[in-house]
């Protein structure tokens, strides 16, 4: 069942999507998403608050990308709320946005990994600034600090939009659209479904 507020007959109810949807070969779609995430560096990780139906988001730096760049790696403090959220409900979303209005949304399943080999693989000395050195010889912000873990997000679906042309050209398209009622051609809107991401 889907939500609809009107009947547009044989005309598309979403002309923006119809005009901007871009469906290149799978390899190009994956590479485009991977490159955009890599260039963005920071995203918003959204989880469901443990014991609640409410959602919460927090900024996260991408520590690494796996599986051709679509599966995401983040550092975390195991004692933070997001690890409780993920333990209760591993379904998450990670979104990215840049200053030109390009964006990406990745939905997937998150796992908190405390295996020291994995933590060492992705460890960064800058983590010490975030978790601190408690001075007890154990919780020192180093790679063996049990508070430091990895969040791996296995992508299930993704949607992203890459800008077409220059900012001036997109501005002209928007003005033209406002005057004529025709949807502007301003983005390459791409979607990756579950079947594609399993390939």
Image (spheres, helix red, strand yellow):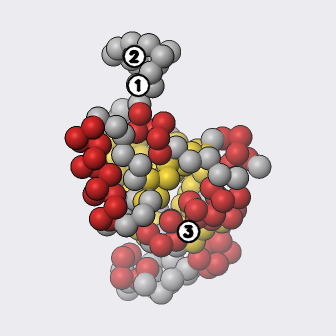
Q: Quadrant of residue 144?
A: bottom right
Tag of residue 8? 2
The residue singled out by tag 1 in the image is: 13
* Residue 121 position in % (x across, y down): 64, 78
The residue singled out by tag 3 in the image is: 35
- Give the residue drawn at x 68%, y 64%: 68
Q: Which of the pair 61/54 is nearer the observer?
A: 61
Badge 2 vs badge 1, beta-carbon distance below 8 Å: yes
Q: Is residue 94 left or right of residue 181?
A: right
* Residue 89 position in % (x across, y down): 50, 40
- Give the residue drawn at x 56%, y 48%: 22
Label 1 vs label 3, nearer the camera? 1
Q: Which of the pair 194/162 is nearer the observer?
A: 162
Query: Quick check: can you spot residue 104?
Result: no
Q: Earlier in the sequence, mark 1 or mark 3?
A: 1
Query: Quick check: can you spot residue 27?
Result: yes
- Label 2: few (<14), some or many (≥20) within 10 Å? few
* Residue 141 position in % (x across, y down): 45, 81
């Amino acid at each position: 069942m889907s939500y609809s507020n009107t009947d547009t007959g044989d005309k598309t109810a979403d002309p923006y999507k119809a005009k901007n949807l871009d469906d290149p070969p799978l390899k190009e779609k994956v590479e485009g998403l991977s490159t955009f995430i890599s260039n963005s560096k920071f995203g918003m990780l959204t989880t469901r608050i443990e014991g609640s139906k409410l959602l919460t988001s927090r900024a996260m730096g991408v520590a690494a990308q796996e599986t051709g760049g679509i599966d995401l790696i983040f550092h975390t403090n195991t004692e933070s709320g997001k690890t409780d959220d993920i333990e209760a409900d591993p379904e998450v979303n990670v979104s990215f946005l840049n200053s030109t209005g390009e964006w990406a949304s990745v939905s997937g399943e998150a796992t908190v990994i405390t295996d020291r080999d994995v933590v060492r693989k992705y460890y960064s000395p800058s983590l010490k600034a975030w978790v601190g050195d408690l001075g007890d010889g154990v919780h020192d912000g180093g790679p063996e600090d049990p508070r430091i873990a990895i969040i791996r997000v296995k992508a299930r679906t993704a949607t992203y939009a890459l800008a077409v042309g220059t900012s001036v050209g997109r501005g002209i398209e928007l003005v033209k659209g406002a005057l004529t009622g025709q949807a502007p051609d301003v983005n390459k809107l791409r979607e990756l479904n579950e079947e594609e991401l399993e390939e």
